Amino acid sequence: MLRATLRALAAPRRAVPVVLVAVPVLYLQQRYSGDPLGLPLGVALVLLFLLTAPAAWRSLFPATEEVRDGFVRLGLYAAVGVAVIATAGSVIPRLLGIPPTFMTTRPSLLVCLGLYWAGGWGLARDIDLEEGFSRERARAERLSQEREEARLLALRNHLDPHFLFNTLNAIAEWCREDGLVAEQAILRLSEMLRAVLAGIQEERWPLAKEVAIVRDLFELHRIRDPDAFRLHMDVPAVLPDVRVPPMLLLPAAENAMKHGPGAGHRGDVSFTLTDDGNFVVVTIENPGEFRGPRQGGHGLEILRKRVASATDGRGSVAMNSVAADGPGRTRTTITLPKGSL
């Protein structure tokens, strides 16, 4: 804390005002003090102020913590000031035989004590505000970078050549065997890709669009293999009027298809959206037991970061196994507080 405070005090925006105040005071100390040690004593008082006052306030009142016993800490800060001024301005001069100087008369020591308290508080608050601003700016830059990375990852995932080639090959076969199915698949694929590409350009879009693109994904998989799973979507007829980052739910839906029916697990796939007035809760279940995050996989972590960023840290993402008669199932729960959307 002391080292960080001294580095902050050395910044020109603080060092220059401190020098402009200290130099006239030290000049008066030398001019109106009859002892040759008057000036060194004045310099010592200034240095002790810079070394102890801002650091003492910042230690007792950390900007990153909630202070509960404020009056006790304020008393300690006042006591530190009294101890420093009394020692440097009264006890040490008496031990060294220095007579009263401009800065060490009783009225002057009271003024020095007031300057110690007020100056230490002011410098400490200024340093804390600057550091807080720097932390918030770094956080904003980090979240912006993570958001951009998530967008690029979403684009890469949803334009995965393997996914597209398999779908296009299936459509080519359907064109020979069942033109109606091929047409449905082309329309679903076209709608999904159009929405993905449009979403990459937007910061947020209506929840209804997000649900629609998830539905397109499920339906496209079902067209490709109608017997692979049974789809159950429980969504209110009127969706909450909230806006979410594009493709916030889509990775979870795609993960359910990839590690459920796509991995050979047969059974029901469900998508449930509930609104209790304060939260929107999305639950996706798929066949196949959840065995923890895969080594080298970052999808779940990126999803959690995107939800945290979109909801100011109030949202959450949970993935766990669900006990069931027969093969295990995986449940993904995404909780979005409406007040932050």
Image (cartoon, helix red, strand yellow):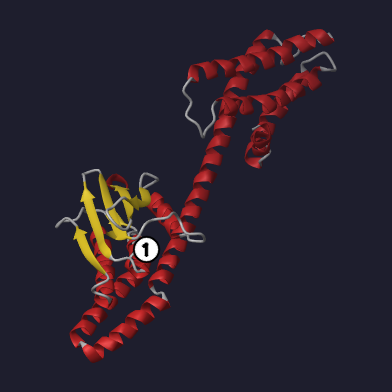
Per the image, label 1 sits on a secondary structure element best described as helix
Q: Kindly indicate the quadrant of the structure image that contains residue 101.
A: top right
Q: How many marks?
A: 1
Which of the two residues, 159 or 320, is positioned nearer the viewer here?
320
Q: Residues within 10 Å of mark 1 (few under 14, many from 20)?
A: some
- The image shows residue 30 at horizontal and vertical percentages of 79, 20
- The image shows residue 337 at horizontal and vertical percentages of 30, 46
The residue at the point 49 percent across, 17 percent down is 71
Which of the two residues, 54 or 278, is positioned nearer the viewer here?
278
**Label 1: which residue?**
255
Using the rendered image of the protein, determine whether residue 140 is visible from the camera's viewpoint: yes
Which of the two residues, 237 or 1, is positioned nearer the viewer here?
237
Which of the two residues, 207 or 328, is positioned nearer the viewer here?
328
The residue at the point 71 percent across, 26 percent down is 24
Looking at the rendered structure, the kind of residue marked 1 is Asn
The residue at the point 44 percent across, 57 percent down is 302
Q: Kindly indicate the quadrant of the structure image that contains residue 53.
A: top right
- The image shows residue 234 at horizontal and vertical percentages of 19, 57
Check the image and report above or below for 176 versus 239.
Answer: below
| 231 displayed left or right of 114 | left
**Which residue, as the protein is rendered here, is positioned at the far front?**
326
- The image shows residue 330 at horizontal and vertical percentages of 34, 56
